[in-house]
Image: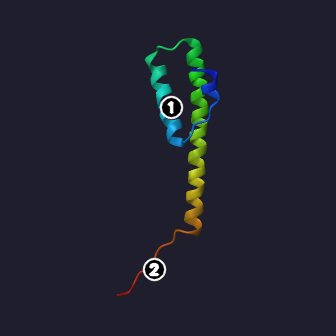
Amino acid sequence: MSQAANDKPPQSFEAALAELESIVQGMEAGKLSLEESLAAYQRGAMLLKHCQGALAAAEQKIQILEAGQLQDLPRSED
């Protein structure tokens, strides 16, 4: 994993999650050198922070929608 790859932000939540899963698989395989493991850990930590931020933003948007837009529909009395 190059330093440039470590600095590049993910294009989406799904891309970050897929890359994070790939990093975990690579680390669990035990085939990385110490330097590669440290770089993978650092990248993984950045991806995790990105995913957590994206989820928090989505949760905030949902709360805003629920507070102002989503309401029970009145029942029709047939």
Residue positioned 56% across, 16% down in the render: 36
Residue positioned 58% across, 66% down in the render: 67
Instruction: Give the vertical position of 51 relative to 75 (above or below).
Output: above
Residue reaching furthest bottom?
A: 78
* Secondary structure found at label 2: loop
Residue that carries the numbered disc 1 in the rendered image: 19
Residue positioned 50% across, 26% down in the render: 23
Residue 34 placement: quadrant: top right
Q: Which mark is residue 74?
A: 2
Residue 37, image x and y in percent?
56, 18
Name which residue type carries label 2. Answer: Pro
Q: Nearer the viewer, residue 20 or 11?
A: 11
Residue positioned 49% across, 20% down in the render: 27
Instruction: Give the vertical position of 74 relative to 52 (above or below).
Output: below
Name which residue type carries label 1. Answer: Glu
Residue 68, image x and y in percent?
59, 68
Q: Earlier in the sequence, mark 2 or mark 1?
A: 1
Q: Which mark is residue 29?
A: none
Instruction: Give the vertical position of 37 relative to 51 (above or below).
Output: above
Spatial CA span between label 2 and label 1 = 46 Å
Quarter of the image with the C terminus in it: bottom left
Residue reaching furthest left?
A: 78
Quarter of the image with the N terminus in it: top right
